Image (cartoon, rainbow, N blue to C red):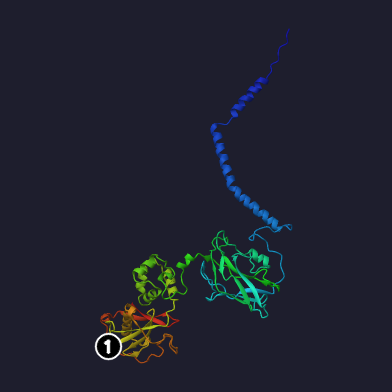
Amino acid sequence: MAAKRLHDGSENEEDQRDEKRMHRLPSFSTVIKEAVMMKQVHNVFMLLEPLLRRVVQEELQAGLVRSPRYIERSSPETSPPPPSSPQATWRLAFLNPPQLPIFTGSKIEDANGNPLQVILVDADTGSPCQNVPQFLRVEVVPLFGDFPHDGREECSSAAEFARGVVKERAGKRPLLTGEVALTMRDGRAVVGELQFTDNSSWLRCRKFRIGARVVPGSGYEGPRVAEAMTEAFIVRDHRGELYRKHYPPALGDDVWRLEKIGKEGAFHKKLTQSGVRTVQEFLQMLVVKPDVLRMIMGDGMTDRMWEATTKHARQCEAGDRVYAYTAGQTGGVGGATVYVNSICQLVKIELAGVECVPQHLNRAQKAYVHQLLLEAFEQRASLQEADMLLHASHSGNDLPLLQNAAPAVPPPLPATPLWFQGTPDIDFQIIDELASQGNFAFKMFDE
């Protein structure tokens, strides 16, 4: 009798495993979602890679700098201070700082408008040296504006200073041109011509310095002479000079040279249309007709802007010229002469041949003089220059040319101006336009 075959369950277990495997297979949508997610993660890694590389590089450089075995191979901007050299006995210095702003192609002068000067001073006291070498070869070079990079104001060695010299961009002219090679005699050298050929916007710090050093290998074998450096400054493209404001403005400057008035801007166009093209014409109207001038500027000019513009304009020097206007010479009311300066500020009054002090004028006479000022303003192009000096010696009166005025009561007017009759509600006030110069004008107001 044959033995019964025992039931083998291995086949059933394999079938169960195949069924479970079929149930675990992902769907098509799941595969797509996972693919999209992997693509996004890959993109994030691609974006983070440059940042991570830079962070790792900076940390490695910082670690190498702190390492005692570090051999200096980095760029001038990342190099640590070199070992200290022998203490300098003398140092170069600029007599005066350069005048700012500086534009490409423009001559660089000092703050007083004179050529830059490099002098030799004592390294400890800063006073000019007495016993100086017969002559020194000095070189003027451009430097990075943030050099030295640790906040120091001088370099410890010539090698360190050399690392701060800026090289011109590829295909460009040398950054500094002109008299960059000087011969210092008796501890002084004058830089006659010097200009930048490129602006400073391409530098990381966006600023330059001007430096001066003894030319390496020039044959000087005395004690170390430390280098000179100016403060950092911005060099702008010469096209910006065309729109530069002037401090102080000049009478003949275009009116857009004043603050808050842009060239060919809205305020400039309004003033031009009203016949105000120069700073002198602006000041003339500001003195005689300030309300009209304010109306011309319109609501677009705020009170703060108006104050800034007029303050800048008043910095202009009026000059020494004085002009006379006599009533009746152009059909005006008769009997008086007023003397004004180039911006129509009143400097002298004569009524019926008598020089008068403004404080002694009565109400009607002030109105009469104010009318003469308006006529003088309207006829300003044809006024005759008076033979007198504006800046006379002052005694007890602060008003120019009025300190010698007669203290007597002014004579009566020849006739009351018709425009003043029937207007008893008008009063007049003397206003000190520029107290430092003693000039004044008249202003009407309602009681």
Depth check: give the residue in front, 429 or 191: 191
Taking 160 as reference, is 341 left or right?
left
Q: Where does residue 383 sit, x and y in percent of width and height? A: 34, 81
- Total number of numbered labels? 1
Q: Which residue is mark 1?
A: 414
For the N terminus, the image quarter is: top right
Q: Where does residue 317 sit, x and y in percent of width and height? A: 44, 78
- Residue 262 falls in which quadrant of the image? bottom left
For the C terminus, the image quarter is: bottom left
Q: Residue at x 67, y 67 (%)?
A: 158
Q: Where does residue 409 sit, x and y in percent of width and height? A: 34, 91
The vertical placement of 193 against 72, above or below, is: below
Depth check: give the residue in front, 379 or 2: 379
Taking 45 as reference, is 394 left or right?
left
Instruction: Evaluate whether residue 2 shows in this view.
Output: yes
Taking 40 as reference, is 420 left or right?
left
Q: Residue at x 64, y 63 (%)?
A: 163
Q: Residue at x 44, y 76 (%)?
A: 316
- Residue 230 falls in which quadrant of the image? bottom right
Q: Residue at x 34, y 88 (%)?
A: 350
Q: Where does residue 49 sit, x and y in percent of width and height? A: 61, 47
Instruction: Evaluate whether residue 447 shows in this view.
Output: no
Mark 1, secondary structure of its residue: loop
Taking 361 as reference, is 247 left or right?
right
The vertical placement of 431 against 63, above or below, is: below
Q: Amino acid at mark 1?
A: Pro
Depth check: give the residue in front, 390 or 41: 390
Q: Residues within 10 Å of mark 1 (few under 14, many from 20)?
A: few
